[in-house]
Image: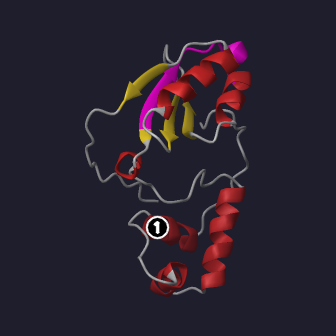
Amino acid sequence: MHAGQADAKHRPLDEIDRRIINRLQDGMPVCDEPYRVIAGELGIGETELLHRLQSMLDDKTLTRFGPMFHAERLGGGLALAAMRVPEAEFERVSTQVNQLPEIAHNYQRAHEFNMWFVIATEQLDEVDTVVQRIESLTGFPVYNMPKIEEYYVGLRFPV
């Protein structure tokens, strides 16, 4: 579950939704009208594709849809971070962490370190500033695990 989000009621996925999700996991075409191209591949209209994507985002079937950038190649910073947060404080802390624009993902885990999130900054040296801001806001230490090496896994989740 995404930290700080209540379970939403998901509408059942139909075959078109499944085809959209599976197709989008393979990337977007680089062209003037990428949604029109994908809609054509799927045999639906561009308006229907956009409507279905928005519906899946609205009902939290999809929690995020957008580009993934290599922050370091753009001069930015990227780090995986974890926190130990008492269950009674979890909602408050996740809300505080999630309000920061540098937080890309925040997930609750059944582990001693029960909150894990990604910090992405415009400048490499800003990661430490964000870590300090989170510690100041929440009152809990942040364990910063900067990326040392990147591996491409090519992970897909067919639906």
Q: Which residue is mark 1?
A: 24
Left/right placement of residue 71 relative to residue 107 reads left
Looking at the image, can residue 11 be seen?
no
Left/right placement of residue 28 relative to residue 44 reads left
**Which residue does the image show at 66% across and 12% down from the upper left?**
139
* Corner quadrant of residue 156: bottom left
What percent of the width, then of the height, locates residue 125?
45, 32
* Corner quadrant of residue 104: top right
**Which residue does the image show at 49% across and 79% down from the upper left?**
34
* Corner quadrant of residue 12: bottom right
What percent of the width, then of the height, locates residue 137?
69, 20
**Which residue does the image show at 40% across and 47% down from the upper left?**
75
Magenta stretch?
78-90
- The magenta stretch spans residue 87: yes
Q: Is residue 92 above or below residue 80?
A: above
Circle 1 — which element?
helix
What percent of the width, then of the height, locates residue 14?
59, 68
Image quadrant occupied by the N terminus: top right
* Residue type at numbered disc 1: Leu
